[in-house]
Image (cartoon, rainbow, N blue to C red):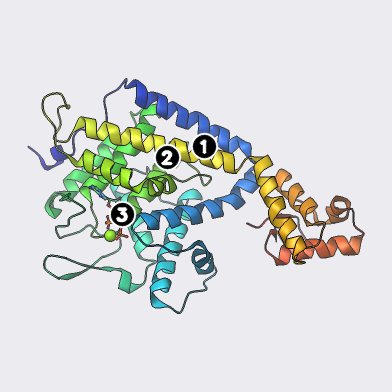
Amino acid sequence: MSDAAALEPMLPPDQDRELEDLAADVIAKSAHLSAQITPLVAQAVGDLVRSMNCYYSNLIEGHDTNPRDIERALESDYSRDPQRRVLQHEARAHIEVQRLIDSGEAPGGGVAKVQYVRWLHMEFCRRLPDELLWVTNPDTGDRLRVVPGEFRQAAVKVGRHVPPAPETLLALLDRFEEAYASPNLSAIRRIIATGAAHHRLLWIHPFLDGNGRVARLLSHAMLREAGVGNSLWSVARGLARRVNEYRAALSNADASRQGDFDGRGARSLAGLRDFCVFFLKTCLDQIEFMQSLLQPAQMLRRMKLYVDDEIAAGSLPKGAMGLLREVFLTGEMERGRAAELTGYRERRARDTLSALLDRGLLTPTSPKGPVRLGF
Ligand SMILES: Nc1ncnc2c1ncn2[C@@H]1O[C@H](COP(=O)(O)OP(=O)(O)OP(=O)(O)O)[C@@H](O)[C@H]1O
Ligand SMILES: [Mg+2]
């Protein structure tokens, strides 16, 4: 048996009604979500979702960086506490790499590829301080360096799973690429393949460390490539909210074939199929969650609650909501319209606009140009 055979089956068989319906639902709902807000607002919301994504992806690994610390890290404001600083670096690295994916700056030529997976790991790890690039083997006490973009040369263990030997990694990853970057997959199969690839990459566990984060970034990139993923929703959040189910589903799909009715490969077909169902349901959950969160009426209501509080505290002028509402609904506002929208005279309208710009709730596109949402 060749090394790569250990990875089979790569995909659940065609014509699995439940999986196909789930994938079709992901296509329909994600299109609906994207159509729901103007592209300029989507851009602003993107940063917020990326922070959320990173927060949750790190949470799976038990690294709990709070959102305020993440925000500070993005402004290069690092804590003096060494432990918090390290977590901030990690969070920032995650967000920056996702931003590269979202803006299409990742290398072209296909996502589910060996080169791409290495690139993700390299970009993520090279942003980390040295102290985060060491792992200790719990059995031997040896300290090993994690080299950005390099596959492991040592054995590892994750939970109960013992990933394949380092000598077999290249053969396994070649098979991975052949199956998941195949041009022959239908639109529906490409979405199902995202879930399968997520598990198979983690089963291979090609890196000494960082496999979980790389796998979640890869899923994001694959969903994007398949036309359903974007900066408006994140599968990492969903996986973190069901971390026990996630681990159990991963572990279940690690299993070898269970008897004659469990496919023909080395691994359990039922385990892989169940993982794909779990993964797609998690995607749907997240798309639906963001859809309700980003409903214009709901967002405006939440914005108003926030602004009312700020007005009551004297930190924003009364006309602030009129300006925010306009920018939220249309994406952009000429500064000259502040008076008309607040109902104030020029001077007071300008002060209201300045207060929103100072607070970062609105952001300029150029020194005198129109303003956009700043959060
Ligand atoms: N039984 C399992 N089989 C395969 N993969 C698993 C299993 N259990 C957990 N995992 C995955 O392995 C990841 C942990 O691997 P690894 O330590 O390389 O990733 P990481 O992103 O560096 O995490 P950490 O921050 O804890 O170092 C988990 O996030 C999860 O995605
Ligand atoms: Mg780790």
List x then y, in percent, for residue 36. Answer: 62, 37
Q: Is residue 195 above or below residue 124?
A: above
Q: Is residue 220 left or right of residue 247?
A: right
Q: Residue at x 29, y 54 (%)?
A: 211
Image quarter in which the N terminus is found: top left
Residue 43 visible within the image: yes
Kindly identify the amino acid type of the residue bearing the numbered disc 1.
Answer: Glu
Few, some or many residues within 10 Å of mark 1 (<14, 14–19, 20+) = some
**Circle nearer the viewer, 2 or 3:** 2
Residue that badge 2 annotates: 223
Residue 175 visible within the image: no
In the drawing, what numbered circle is on residue 288? 1
Which residue sits furthest left?
A: 1
Which badge, 1 or 3, is on the more N-terminal residue? 3
Residue 2 picture quarter: top left
Task: Find residue 249 and report its image quarter.
Answer: top left
